[in-house]
Amino acid sequence: MRVYHSNNFRSGCKIIFENEPYLIESSEFVKPGKGQAFVRVKLRKLLTRQLIEKTFKSTDYLEIADVIEHTLCYLYNDGFFWYFINNNTFEELSVEKKIIGIQKKWLLEQDTCIVTLWNNKPILVTPNTFVEIKVIETDATLKGDTINTGVTKLAILSTGAIVRVPLFIQVGSLIKVDTRSGEYVSRIK
């Protein structure tokens, strides 16, 4: 069993804590004037994306998680499974609908994304940070509505996602969206 000692906790390390994989987002070594040194750590639970703070003694250690990230190409889905392929080895991987979760609205066919495996089972799918998606439905704007800056309207994208866009965006427009926040970034010409 390979382990990280608490004084080696660094941002980006993947560890097993309470029998689940976690990602260390930040760590701070504290040596108070009185008492034992400790490490204050922010951990991101890889299964649910929940963030927690924990304190460890300087003598504590945690097991290194068997977490691997693969860059795969999204192929298609059948409603129950999403299918990906490794373009180097041509191995296919299927991921259950519950693991895909809300990320399905950012997955476009033939796009690459990162699939995280824990003990060779998919636990997380991370789409590209920015995706270019076509607008399939939005409200029409009247002439003169575009005078006010900062005014937005709702647009439905080809993947089913709903995003707030500026008034000048029309049906058929190709837009760039930030998948982390679900916000409109720019129009693609």
Image (spheres, grey):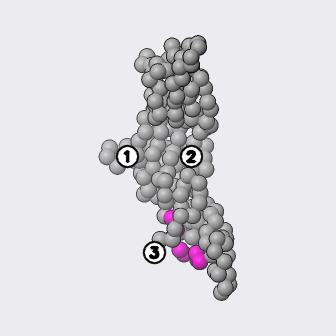
Q: Which mark is residue 86?
A: 1
Front: mark 3 or 2: 3
Residue at mark 2: 100
Residue located at (59% from left, 77% from top): 168
Label 2 – label 1 distance at C-alpha:
17 Å
Q: Image height check: is 27 above or below 145?
A: above
Magenta stretch, main secondary structure class:
loop
**Label 1 Cα crowd, 10 Å radius (few <14 / some 14-19 / many 20+):** some
Q: Nearer the viewer, residue 70 or 13?
A: 13
Q: Position of residue 109 (x, y in %)?
A: 46, 58
| Upstream in sequence: badge 3 or badge 1 | 1
Q: Secondary structure at mark 3?
A: loop
- Residue 19 belongs to the span the image colors magenta: no
Q: Residues within 10 Å of mark 3 (few under 14, many from 20)?
A: few
For the C terminus, give its image quadrant.
bottom left
Check residue 189 in the rendering and tell me which mark sits there, or answer none.
3
Q: Give the Cα distance between marks 3 and 2.
A: 30 Å
Q: Amino acid at mark 2?
A: Ile
Given the current orientation, which residue lies at the most extreme left position?
88
User: Depth check: 94 or 162 in front?
Assistant: 162
Residues drawn in magenta: 168-176
User: Is residue 36 visible from the viewing direction of this image?
Assistant: yes
Query: Which amino acid lies under the numbered mark 3 shown in the image of this protein?
Result: Lys
Label 2: state its secondary structure. helix
Q: Is any atom of residue 137 visible in this view?
A: no
Q: Position of residue 100 (x, y in %)?
A: 56, 46
